[in-house]
């Protein structure tokens, strides 16, 4: 059976600016699944954050017409039907020491997130600079956040180390950081909180949206050419480049030049337009 895999980003793509999913896009995902197309969400959010986002819009997780959740930027994959994690990648204490030492050296504020499934818990280190987005995130998750005063407090395993930079980063600077942290997956993203600050997320070297999608497609025996993806931010770029067909919503960040830029945004059913333009919908 020649199945397809349809993957959509969440924030800024499937979610509109009110952090809700339009009835039309929900209907589109349902129609795709009825046609035998596998549907997945690829998000930087943890499972806990994803669940909270659904709770805020009164949508039960089991009612979301999605087969798989690629969460924490591909570090984990959740089978929605079975509510079971089928892929889980972690970095270990010696990795975290190496990464945090690097961020300390260049005076970047960062957070160390505990390994899946407890990713919501994190340690944080501030260098005293003005960084509103960093402190907003700590406040948002204050029940799960603890200050990091010494390496001895580090987790034995972590999902990621996340540095928050209170400004945009040039492609050259991002490339330099990827070179400095060779051996890890270094993901550049725009903060979903203030939509301005840069996030540098460091994961296991096999953790990314594209590698998670490739792993899932292989497991499902779906060829790369039959994978369709839609996104809006830098952390979608590798997925969009890898997929057989890729689309960007009109509100995509400037500089994201991968995939077909559609004339509609996340507020105008961009996911539905991508599904139609891909040929998956009549």
Image (tube, rainbow, N blue to C red):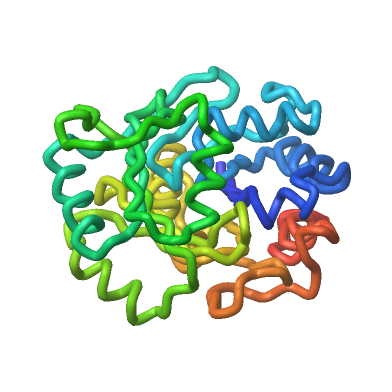
**Residue at point 50% right, 66% down?**
234
Q: Is residue 81 above or below residue 77?
A: above
Question: In the picture provided, is 67 more to the left or to the right than 99?
Answer: right
Q: Position of residue 20 (x, y in %)?
A: 79, 43
Question: In the picture provided, is 245 more to the left or to the right than 124?
Answer: right
Q: Is residue 4 above or below residue 194?
A: above
- The image quarter containing residue 60 is top right
Q: Position of residue 22 (x, y in %)?
A: 84, 46
Count the numbered circles shown: 0
Q: Give the quarter of the figure containing the C terminus.
A: bottom right
Q: Nearer the viewer, residue 66 or 90?
A: 90
Instruction: Single out the residue that lies furthest toward the front.
Output: 128
**Residue at point 24% right, 29% down?**
155
- The image quarter containing residue 32 is top right
**Residue at point 77% right, 65% down?**
265
Q: Position of residue 81 (x, y in %)?
A: 59, 21
Question: In the picture provided, is 54 more to the left or to the right than 210?
Answer: right
Q: Position of residue 191 (x, y in %)?
A: 55, 57
**Residue at point 57% right, 47% down?**
5
Q: Is residue 54 above or below residue 215?
A: above
Q: Is residue 87 visible?
A: no
- The image quarter containing residue 37 is top right
Q: Give the quarter of the figure containing the N terminus.
A: top right
Q: Is residue 94 visible?
A: yes
């Amino acid at each position: 059976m020649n199945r397809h895999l349809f993957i959509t980003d969440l924030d800024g793509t499937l979610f509109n600016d009110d952090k809700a999913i339009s009835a039309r896009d929900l209907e589109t995902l349902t129609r795709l699944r009825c046609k035998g197309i596998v549907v997945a969400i690829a998000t930087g959010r943890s499972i806990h954050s994803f669940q909270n986002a659904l709770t805020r819009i009164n949508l039960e997780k089991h009612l979301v017409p999605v087969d798989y959740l690629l969460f924490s930027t591909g570090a984990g994959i959740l089978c929605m039907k079975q509510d079971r994690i089928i892929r889980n990648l972690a970095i270990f204490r010696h990795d975290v020491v190496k990464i945090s030492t690097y961020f300390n050296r260049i005076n970047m504020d960062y957070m160390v997130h505990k390994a899946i499934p407890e990713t919501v818990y994190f340690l944080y280190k501030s260098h005293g600079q003005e960084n509103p987005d960093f402190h907003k995130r700590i406040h948002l998750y204050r029940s799960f956040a603890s200050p990091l005063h010494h390496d001895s407090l580090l987790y034995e395993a972590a999902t990621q180390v996340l540095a928050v930079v209170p400004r945009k980063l040039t492609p050259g600077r991002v490339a330099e950081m990827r070179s400095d942290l060779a051996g890890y997956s270094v993901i550049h993203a725009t903060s979903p909180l203030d939509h301005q600050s840069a996030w540098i997320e460091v994961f296991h070297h096999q953790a990314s949206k594209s590698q998670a999608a490739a792993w899932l497609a292989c497991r499902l025996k779906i060829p790369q050419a039959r994978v369709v993806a839609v996104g809006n931010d830098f952390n979608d770029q590798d997925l969009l480049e890898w997929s057989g067909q890729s689309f960007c919503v009109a509100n995509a960040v400037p500089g994201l030049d991968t995939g077909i830029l559609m004339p509609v945004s996340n507020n105008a059913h961009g996911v539905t337009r991508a599904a139609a333009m891909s040929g998956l919908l009549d």
